[in-house]
Image (cartoon, rainbow, N blue to C red):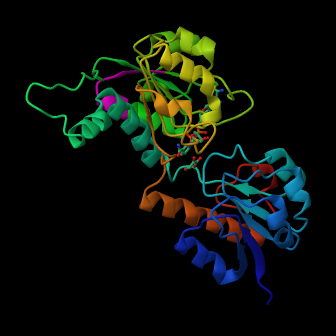
Amino acid sequence: MEKYKVVITGRVLPAALAALETQCQVYRWEQPTAPTLADLSGWLKDADGLFVSTNIAVNEQLLAAAPRLKVIAQPAVGYDNIDIAACTSRKIPFGNTPGVLVETTADLAFGLLLTAARRIHEGWDWVRAGKWQPGAQLPYGVDLYGKTLGIVGMGAIGSAVARRGQASGMKVIYNNRTPRADQADLKAEYCTFDQLLSEADFIVVLTPLTPESRGMFGANEFAKMKPTAYFINAARGAVVDTQALYNALQAKQIAYAALDVTDPEPLPADHPLLQLPNILIVPHIGSATTETRNRMALLAAENLLLGVEGKPLVTCVNTEVNYR
Ligand SMILES: NC(=O)C1=CN([C@@H]2O[C@H](COP(=O)(O)OP(=O)(O)OC[C@H]3O[C@@H](n4cnc5c(N)ncnc54)[C@H](O)[C@@H]3O)[C@@H](O)[C@H]2O)C=CC1
Ligand SMILES: O=C(O)C(=O)CO
C-alpha cells in the first residue's frame, strides 16, 4: 500500500518522527531557518498531511499549494499562525495540543514572576561577577505574599498560574472574555481590564493572540498600571506593543517586565529592550521540558496519523470539520 505523504516544516522530536514514519513518507525541512512557501511547494502539492511549526503562516496561499491536504497538526496550543477559517472552508481539520503543557507553562510564567521579584537572575550575575564582597548588597526585591496577582486570560494556563500565586499568599484577580463559571473554586475575583491594570501588583498575560488581543498592552495600558507593577508575558509577543513597553520601562512608569515571548521573536541582539536594567527575557521556553515537549510532539503526531486516515483528531480546533 502506498504510504501517506507528510510534510514537516521544521524540527520534530525523534519519538514523533518515528511514529509518523510508521505510516507515512516524510518530507522534512532540515535547515535552521524557516522554509518559504517556495521551499515547500514541491512537497506540498502531493501532501496528505502537514506537521507544522508556529513560525510558518498557514494561509490561503499555502493551502492552495497543497490541494490534497487532509489534516494539519501543530505541536503547540497557540495557533495564531493558522488561518482556521481557510482550513475549515477546505474541510481540513487542524489539531493543536491543549492540556498537555498547562502545568509546565504555568511553572515558567510563575517562575519568571518569582525570579524577577526576588532578583534571582541578577543575584547570580552579581555573585558570578565577584561582587559578593563584605558590606556589598544587591538591591532588594519585593514580596509576593499579600500582593495582588492580576491574570489576563484565565484559561487552562492562567488558572494554573492562579494556583501558584495563591500558594504564595497572593490575592488573585483576573480578566477574561467572560467571567468563569467556576470562579468560586478558582478563588479568584473577576474584574474589568482597567480595574486589573490599576489594582494588580503583578500582571501575567496568558491570552491567545487574536485580532482582539493584538497590541492590547500599549501606552494607555502601561500608564494605568502602578509604578511598582511587574508585567509578565508568557502568551505571545504581539499582545504587547513593544515600543510602548520599552518606553514604560525606561521612564519607570512600571517597575519591571519579565517576558517569555517577544515581538519580534527572536529579538535581534542589538534590540533596545536588551539594554534595559529592569527586564528579564527568556527565549520562549514556556513548554520546553523534555517530558512536555515529547507529550506535545506525540499528540500532534497522533492527530496527524488520525487525520490522514480520515478519522477524527483527538484535539481539533475547527471541530465542525473533525468528522470525516
Ligand atoms: N510561552 C509559551 O511557551 C506558551 C504560550 N502559550 C500561549 O498561551 C495561550 C493560552 O493558552 P491556554 O491557557 O492553554 O488557552 P485557553 O484557551 O485555555 O485560555 C485562554 C483564555 O484567554 C481568554 N481570552 C481570550 N481572549 C481574551 C482577551 N482579549 N482578553 C481577555 N481574555 C481573553 C479566553 O477566554 C480563555 O479563558 C495560548 O493561546 C498561547 O498563545 C501557550 C503555551 C505555551
Ligand atoms: O504551545 C504554544 O502555544 C507555545 O507557545 C509553545 O509551547
Marker count (numbered): 0
Q: Give the quarter of the image for residue 311.
A: bottom right
- Residue 192 seen: no
Picture quadrant of ligand 1: top right
Please tell me which residue lies in front, 288 or 277.
Answer: 277
Q: Position of residue 69 (x, y in %)?
A: 84, 66
Q: Where is residue 199 in the image (x, y as percent from the top left)?
A: 45, 11
**Quick check: 222 left or right of 290?**
right
Q: Where is residue 241 in the image (x, y as percent from the top left)?
A: 64, 25
Please tell me which residue lies in front, 234 or 272.
Answer: 272
Please tell me which residue lies in front, 129 or 247.
Answer: 129
Vertical side of 155 occupied by 38: above or below: below
Q: What stretch is highlighted in magenta?
A: 164-173
Q: Residue at x 71, y 79 (%)?
A: 24
Please tell me which residue lies in front, 133 or 55.
Answer: 133
**Quick check: 10 left or right of 49?**
left
Q: Does the magenta stretch include residue 166?
A: yes
**Quick check: 175 left or right of 60?**
left
Q: Residue at x 40, y 26 (%)?
A: 277
Residue at the left extreme of this rendering: 134
Q: Give the quarter of the image for residue 313.
A: bottom right
Vertical side of 70 occupied by 104: above or below: above
Vertical side of 119 occupied by 94: above or below: below
Q: In which quarter of the image is the C terminus?
A: bottom right
Q: Which residue is drawn at 83% across and 52% down?
A: 87
**Quick check: 191 left or right of 30?**
left
- Residue 166 seen: yes
Q: Position of residue 111 (x, y in %)?
A: 37, 38
Q: In which quarter of the image is the N terminus?
A: bottom right
